[in-house]
Amino acid sequence: MEDKYIIEMLNITKEFPGIKANDNITLQLKKGEIHALLGENGAGKSTLMSILFGLYQPTSGTIKKNGEVVQINNPNDANDLNIGMVHQHFKLVECFSVLDNIILGVEPTKGIFLEKKNARKRVVELSDKYGLSVDPDALISDITVGMQQRTEILKMLYRDNEVLIFDEPTAVLTPQEISELMKIMKNLAKEGKSILFITHKLNEIMEVADRCTIIRKGKYVGTVDIPSTTKEELSRMMVGRDVSFSVDKKPANPGKTVLKITGMTVPSKSHSNNAVKNVSLNVREGEIVCIAGIDGNGQSEFVQALTGLEKMTAGTIMLNGKDITNDSIRMKSKEGMSHIPEDRHKHGLILDYMLDQNIVLQRYWDSEFQTGGFIKSKAVREYSDRLIEEYDVRSGQGSSTIVRSMSGGNQQKAIIAREIDKAPEILVAVQPTRGLDVGAIEFIHKQLVAQRDKGKAVLLVSLELDEVMDVSDRILVMYEGEIVGQLDPKTVSVEELGLYMAGAKRDEVPAEV
């Protein structure tokens, strides 16, 4: 019976200071199957997969490969056992090219010299075969988060691994890219690969997985056959309660213009054309405006220019009638702009700081938290403890937890708590539910709608079509750095929205939308 399992993780327990991340979990992967691993943020999914990949050692438990006990001390051992992993938080060297990252650790040589020609050819072939469309010569620092994700997938395919761990691989992909990835995964399984697939997206599990193991708060809940279950049952097993899959909101009642952008132009880092081309838009109080588009069409550069991370070459930004175009990031924050960034590690958190320090990053200079340049530690801790409680941020040691040790979803919740609690005039939310479970997504959507209903302006940038359609009051589609359509989510279809996003359809959009 055992030999039908290519991987068995038996009675795995892993303890960290203050938390038992995995508590006696058993997971069995059949040869040639796609096995989903489902759980809330901080449930222990990534920890369990990191043990299988050799990044952590279990406190107790056994791992078997093809029925034989194996010891996986590090990722090299995992690779020797043909186990590969696409990480949720990318393991890429930013100053290296895509090709250099893919071959890192298995560099082809001729004598003492690197021999990249054949490797480059193979990477291009794999990229074409799986529709990943990655430029092998581009620097990681210059490509989008979505392109970095594809580089991680290529890195694993390049190594011919037979057990493939996908840790939230679709978190940064567009709907079209997700559909392609689902096909890739099915093809890999047909070729005899065995796939462990961590995701929060129940639709993906229902579409692609054969079986699903659910864990909650570090404990094993059960394993189910996907053909005989439902999304509702999976979500109930995951969070321990019923979850609403629709966003409950009343019609918007927009007031005066809060954010007014005129003629924004932003240069591209990767080519000679502008990434954002003469974009003008308004966001009014009491409305959620969503910028939709396929990743890489100027949304990232637009947000970076808006929030002060990048310089504009033309255009103005007005907040409540005041010109903030050239203000610093801190001044924009003080003027009432909050920013939930696309990349929480690069622009949202200082990973080696404690949670309470991260939670006051945008406010530590307020008199509430400092006197004469000295931080009031007690006030900071009390404030942090309150937000941790209100936003259900799960961490092993509460406010004193080092943020790097927290799950991605709980890192995201900490940023959202910090940015919303500032009571901003304009909330710029970029992929705010990326990597969150259904319970947390439901909570975040309620927070965005609550901000709108308080009369705040919300600018949402999202690649998730469901989120775009359900949360926004007005949709602006960005294609190749331009606004090509202004759509009403109540009347537009997903198919029509997709045509605008792909550039197959565009309107003459008014100068100010």
Image (cartoon, rainbow, N blue to C red):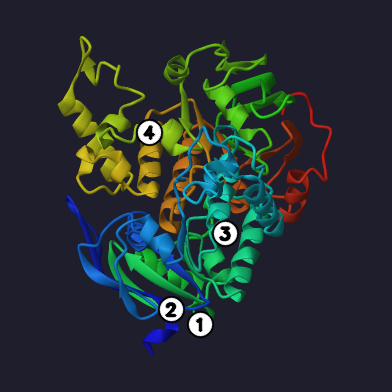
Q: Amino acid at mark 4?
A: Leu
Q: Secondary structure at mark 4?
A: loop
* Residue at image mark 1: 228
Seen at 48% across and 14% down, the residue is: 328
Q: Which residue is mark 4?
A: 349
- Local crowd at mark 1 within 10 Å, few (<14), some, or many (≥20)? few
Q: Amino acid at mark 1?
A: Ser
Q: Residues within 10 Å of mark 2 (few under 14, many from 20)?
A: some
Q: Give the x, y percent position of residue 312.
A: 63, 17
SS at mark 1 in the image: helix
Residue underneath mark 2 = 224
Rounded to the nearest angstrom, the CA distance separating label 4 from label 2 is 37 Å
Image quarter for residue 385? top left
Q: Is residue 192 positioned above or below 246 on the image?
A: below
Q: Which residue is mark 3?
A: 157
Quadrant of image for the N terminus: bottom left
Question: Front-most of 154 and 512?
Answer: 154
Q: Residue at 38% across / 69% down in the picture?
A: 214
Instruction: Please report whichever mark, 3 or 4, sits nearer to the chain's N-terminal start.
Output: 3
Q: Is residue 251 visible?
A: no
For marks 4 and 2 on the same chain, the one whose residue lies earlier in the sequence: 2
Please indicate whether residue 73 sits to the left or right of residue 112 in the image. left
Quarter of the picture containing the C terminus is top right
